[in-house]
Amino acid sequence: MKIKFGQSKQSTVGIEWELAVVDATTFEQVPAADVILSRVDDPVNGPIRNEYLTSMIELVTGVHQTVPSAVAEMRRHLEHVLSELEPRGLTLLGAGAHPFGDPRTQRPGDKPQYRRVTERNAWWGQQMAINGLHIHAGIDHRDKALPIVYGMARFAPYFISLSASSPFWIGEDTRFASQRTMVFQQLPTNGLPYHMSDWGELERFASQLEGVGLIQNPSEIRWDVRPSTWGTVENRCMDSVPTLMEIGALAAFDQCLVERMSRALQRDEPIHRLPYWFMRENKWRAARYGLAADVITHRKDEYLMHVSDGIKRWVEDLTPISEELGCAQNLAHVRELVDRGPSYLRQRRVAAANGHDPVAVTRALVEELRAGKPIFGEAR
């Protein structure tokens, strides 16, 4: 199977944001995506498009040179959608999973690929009422793509911890920061990327999957980080987040890391990798403990590192690059999220202050989305 890798400028940015459609009064997730999709020109490939469930939509930016520009476009799409939904008693929720909704009551859209997911994955296919955030960073040469894919996969626990927004599942605190991570990895081609020595091996891998009926096209290889046909490395390991501020922070962190790795490759410097089994353990720890996770590093003198400490170090290291790329303020928000709390911690604060009522948690998520920035409450 041939896999196309398009032409992109280095470190350009594109963002995909999956959102749940909810009733503005009860905050139940409802199958009303068509209210907005019936009013857009192209609900399949346009910037406001359908998603797996009839109660989900996806907002997608074009290609941008800077993170602030991409976030500004996303804001325009969000404002347009809310202007259509809110007069009809509907709104949007940005989170890895709805805090109290039963995923089994949701229905996939009428698309062959969606039907295959539901049928093939049986009980797990019925649990896929989950939402993600995907960030694309442009790569100027295909030979860089796979090394950067593996390099970025090492940072999956950082991105999972920062974006984790699904601690609740059907009204219960799972004690995981990201329940979405645990659910999504049940699909057969999901998870961390396997090491491929070159593009030819990736294409042989895809051909083998096609030959045994696992996939019909390369997009069904749903790695946490993968090369995209658009000429990008796509970071897919994140929960959907409630606010545009968080989108900008995560996009800046992603863009700066990709740019740093691209420059290293140009200088023939190695990009550090971890063994697959350690990356898998780190991913689990981040999904479970969020910022409190201790992750395994490649450093012999510092074998374990607190996720929050690692993120702060990388923010400091990447600040000069962020200034060059025009996203320094967005990257600074990463540090603020570490200090004041990603969504999973904010949700638990709301729950604790409201008798552990998941409806109150859902209401707070909706309020944050409208505000465009986190409502932190008490500091950790």
Image (cartoon, rainbow, N blue to C red):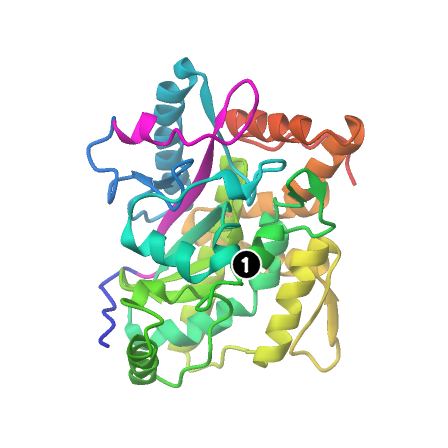
> Is residue 26 rendered magenta in the image?
yes
- Using the rendered image of the protein, determine whether residue 315 is visible from the camera's viewpoint: no
The residue at 41%/78% (across/down) is 267
The amino acid at mark 1 is Leu
Name the residue nearer the viewer: 131 or 333: 131
How many labels were placed on the picture? 1
Give the left or right position of residue 169, taking residue 272 as reference. Answer: right
**Residue 235 percent coordinates (x, y):** 45, 59
Residue marked by disc 1: 318
**Residue 281 percent coordinates (x, y):** 66, 71
The image quadrant that residue 46 belongs to is top left
Image: magenta residue range: 10-38
> Is residue 151 rendered magenta in the image?
no
Q: Secondary structure at mark 1?
A: helix
- Using the rendered image of the protein, determine whether residue 350 is visible from the camera's viewpoint: yes
Other-residue count near label 1 (Cα within 10 Å), few / some / many at <14 / 14–19 / ≥20: many
